[in-house]
Amino acid sequence: MHALVLVVLLAAEAPAAAPQRPDPAPPAQAAAAPAPAPAPSGSVALAVPPPIADAERLLASEVTAGVGFLGSGYSQPGYRLGDAHFAPSLTGRYVFHGLTADGGVLFAVPVTADGTAFAFTASLRAGWTWRKWSLLAGAVLQVASGAQPALQVLPTLRLSADFGPVGATLGVVDVLGLVPAHLSFDMKVGGRRFSFGWAFPIGLLASLDLPVSGRWGLKVSGFAFKAFQSEFAMVTVAGTFGAER
Amino acid sequence: MTRALAAVLFALVGCTPRPGLDGAVPSLDTLGKGLPKGFLWGTATAAHQIEGGNDNDWTDWEAGSFPDGTPHIADGKPSGQACDSWNRFDEDLAAMQAMGVTTYRFSVEWSRLEPTEGAWDAAAMARYRDWTVRLRAAGIEPMVTLHHFTLPKWVAARKGFETTDTQAAFEAFVRRVGAELQDTVDFWCPFNEINVYAAQGYLSGVWPPGTKDDTALQVTVMSNMLKAHAKAAAGLREVDTVDANGDGAATVITHAHHVRVFQPASHSVLDTAIAGLTDDVANEAIPRAFQTGRIRFSVPGTIEIDEAVDGLAGSIDVLSLNYYTRDIIRADLGSAALSQSYFKGGRPRNDLGWDLYPDGLYLMLKRFSSYGWPLYVSENGTADAADDFRSDYLAQHVAAIERAVKEGADVRGYYHWSLMDNFEWAEGYTASFGLYAVDFGNTFARNKRPSVDTFTAIGANIPR
């Protein structure tokens, strides 16, 4: 990363005001902590905020391995040219002092004979994660067997924000390049994180995270949308390994 | 909204069943028996490709080359005398009769009949009329195409169908031919492949006028030709009031619509969405215009046309499909077509590299039967100079028709492209689509290929 960008990102770590969401530390622990020394009068510029622990950041490191079923095609009255694919995927995210990288691979194995080609997709993004924001950008590369040209490259972007009880995510060429754009919202209900959103131009996407034990979990996700004459849908069941739940 | 929801749910669980018709070759003992009684069985040609001696916009184009020096015509040879059919109709008719055809689709050449504006070649018209008389006497139903890719030079000089003025000139020409042939011809096709004409001339730029990457002009030309079709159809119905074959209809008007399967290269949104858009512009927009009376073309970011046209709805009585192959579509946002198209690897191909894909004919017949028009296959054939696979191609495509018919499609005729090898536009004389080979430039003899026997055997099985 360019040094200047890193400086800007580090500078942005400094909260302008007190954190909005409750301190994650238990009350007893908070009581035991030493009281902060009062700032010397007239020395505001010297008040350096404490660094954000990775556990306090909006996103945490995580690995997900899933199997999906993907349908793609286009239609006209009386006609539909569609193909189904078995779609295993592996994705990961790593957060280190705010510096964040996420990526993944997806194999689209056509189930339909003589339809679309076998394709491999790789996504790689980098960015920064704060307490309440995360911004990642990168590229999605797709290689399709026998295609001319074989390689297809698209930009991808994901912006996430925490608004207290609800989080929001704006994705462009997201979900391993499968969803052209989406705006989704997530919340935690009964210990389970649930997200639901609008997939551009006409469609929906949703996911449900189910804690299994410790750092292990199960994620069921899917989307369905229509773009011009084409339509897409996918359901994925994945195992996740990440932060303590 | 309901339709969108149904579509995405279908996308999740559904994939298009492909019947796999390019597998086993059906038995010639029974092939054809599954077609309906009275099914028309014939061949197709086009004036400029077979007549020889024409002088039109293609004549100029054939003499030229692209900026890089590559000749406009693959082998550098102009159409010239072509098959000399202008002087050898006897031989063409004999070849057809030997195969037992019951219909023949051919075109009359506008530039021959009206070489300059307002001038009319009565002798040429009389010859065309003689052909139709003799065809009918031989029990062969003529289908007459009025525009098959060529323009008189005086029309081309006025920018052809780029402008709205040409519609009136074309209507006048069609009315005159309609009046001249009203007692011998019922089956009329004002235009052949509007979509191909516009794409080759204004997108790929490999046909006259050689304009490249002008999507806006491409769809403008298509729009103007649809308007001209509406006027031509109205004119034909007005001037042709004689029921030549006694079936109760003085005119049956069709459009020979080129259809092809646009298969996305991969599951990606871009590939699939652009394949869908390509399909909409190339396959769907024209029949939709005939049905609704509205011309609607949408190329996002380039041009949107949405216009009601008087007389367009109901301007065809039957829809005819020209089907050859399937294209694979790979998104390429840097190109005017937004994609690269190519033929799938690992598949049987013809001499031009085209995918031999009979499933596509089945899919298209099923698809367009939903419009409610009776259907004809107005062109289907393959380039196969050695005649190695034409018989199998023919048999598998007829099997595709039989299957569609069995599943309810109202298909009433088949025209094989082509009766004989001919001048194949930009491919020149390098592509051999004929049931008969032609000794070009020498004796012009029509030499029967083995696939003629397949064609004849299938025809003999059709219920009469």
Image: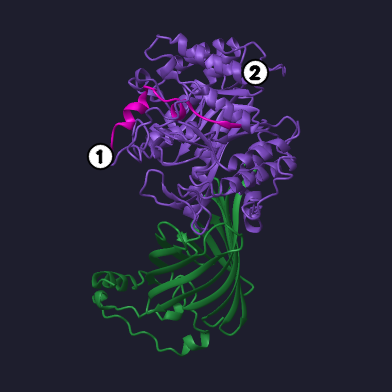
Chain colours: A green, B purple
Q: Give the range drawn in magenta.
A: B42-65
Q: Is mark 1 on a helix, strand or loop?
A: loop
Q: Which of marks 2 and 1 is nearer the N terminus?
A: 1
Q: Where is residue B172 in the image (x, y as percent from the top left)?
A: 48, 12
Q: Where is residue A26 in the image (x, y as percent from the top left)?
A: 52, 84
Q: Does the magenta stretch include residue A188?
A: no
Q: What element carries label 2?
A: helix
Q: Mark 2 points at which residue?
A: B137
Residue B264: give its label. Answer: none
Q: Where is residue A229 in the image (x, y as percent from the top left)?
A: 55, 45
Badge 1 crowding class, 10 Å Cα cut-off, few under 14, some 14 to 19, many 20 or more, is: few
Q: Is residue B58 magenta?
A: yes
Whether residue B6 is situated above or below residue A119 in the rendered picture: above
Q: Which of B338 and B374 is in front in this view?
A: B374
Q: Mark 1 points at which residue?
A: B67
In the rendered image, the quadrant that contains the N terminus of chain B is top right
